[in-house]
Amino acid sequence: MQMRSATLKTIIEKTLPLTLGVFAIMMVQLVDSIFIGQLGVNELAVHGITLPFQAAFTGVQVGIGVAATSIISQAVGAKEQRKSTSIATLSVGFGVLVIALICLGLIVFSDSVFSSFVNDVSDAQYQSMLSIFNVYWPLWLFSALMVAVLYLATCVYRANGDTKTTGSMFLAASVINLILDPILIFGLDMGIAGAAIASSIGYAFGAIYMLIKSRGKGWFGFNGACRNQIKGYSFELFKTVMPTTANQILPAVSAFFSMLLIARIGTDEMAFWSLLARVESFMLVFSLALTMSIPPMIGRYLGAQQRCKIPELLNTTAKFLLVFHTAMAALLALFSGWIIPVISEEQNIRSWFEVTLLFIPFSYGPLGLCMLVASVFNALGVPRKALNVSFLRLFVFYIPALWLGSITGEMINAVIAATVANVLAGAFAWFKLNAYIKTHIIPRAAAANKQRVLSAG
């Protein structure tokens, strides 16, 4: 019991700063959607177009970040400073370059992006939405680049055991964004463009601060690494990035198809799905924070040859996650009558939320568990297993279920289908992780303990 208490205390200490920081970012994103929703349904629908692309950017940067965090944390555990700093430098530089190139490509093909999502509307509404999109799109892409710089910098901090600075910078970026949002959107009458500019300023501040502060910690640089060593580190990073990025891009592909399925029902449904996605992101803050705090701990245990601590860490984390999400879902259902009027003024959207908030939040616990399992597999050095878990969650459970719900033409049926898919995916992921722990981690931990006993004797 004392060991469990110590493990839970460590989990909370490492996760709480990240939870507060990510919570602040998600809150600002939700407030962004609310402000944009007050501008009109067209603005909110245009904002909804960015969701799958936001998921794509997140997939790329998180894929690179997960790979970097896994390698750096194990190097830190094994006290290999040259390797840890070299990987940190390579991952941030490579990640920023990739995101910048994607942004440039999406600006060039902006017309194709818009026409893929907007159809079955009048010519007048099409032109109105197009004019909004043309202003918002490049500004939003720049804000996405700033998010990438900030996130990749935080990966280096977390891999070195510093979650407090990461949480603080997430919080600072959010506060700046929250202050500037109403000023730019309404005060200066910039509309939806003001939301993107406010985000860019907030995230740029956090990124610049973290990069400057890291100079005093010695977490970047090649530290005398020769060309062959740098090539070796680059190859190791690239080899790990490929499956982790593919794993993270799957949700973006899923979000793209999800939005296409919902778009076939109607424009109001697109706006509702956009807001529901924000609520889901908000509810998954704790799970997301765990996926950021637990993998570096596992990496350091692996680097220090302390595999025996991993099963207890995972069991305690899973129980804590499920209890937390169940409590949050109950509170959301209880206070939904006060929350829904704040989310939207549209009657259709309100009526859908009145029903969906009574059941879908209870599926976010299993969904969060599935997210955690994927991040754990990456940390354990088996990214292909993480890829399999994510692929099955999205393309065996989620998308087919959403398709079945959407073909009925009823928004509530689509949400019910998504709820069932989340629960099934969570149960499947935990089963797969338990099987791996029993066959790979526990036997190796026992063998290592036996070897230490023999060496001591």
Image (cartoon, rainbow, N blue to C red):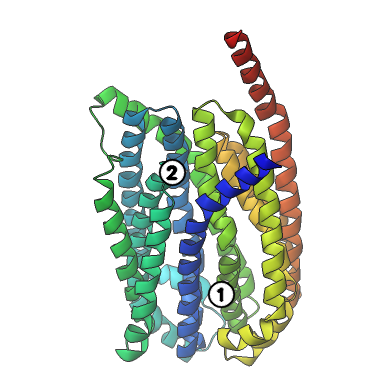
Q: What's the residue type where badge 2 is placed?
A: Gly
Q: Nearer the viewer, mark 1 or mark 2?
A: 2
Answer with left or right where residue 438 lies relative to residue 95.
right
Residue in view at x 52 percent, y 46 percent: 246
Q: Quadrant of the C terminus?
A: top right
Q: Quadrant of the N terminus?
A: top right
Secondary structure category for the residue under label 2: loop
Give how far apart the Cα atoms at labels 1 and 2 are. Answer: 35 Å
Disc ID at residue 274: 1
Indicate the position of residue 100 as horizontal and vertical percent values.
32, 56
Indicate the position of residue 257 as horizontal and vertical percent values.
59, 63
Q: What's the residue type where badge 1 is placed?
A: Ser
Write down the residue under mark 2: 161
Secondary structure category for the residue under label 1: helix
Indicate the position of residue 308 as horizontal and vertical percent values.
63, 29
Residue in view at x 46 percent, y 84 percent: 35
Indicate the position of residue 236 as horizontal and vertical percent values.
42, 31
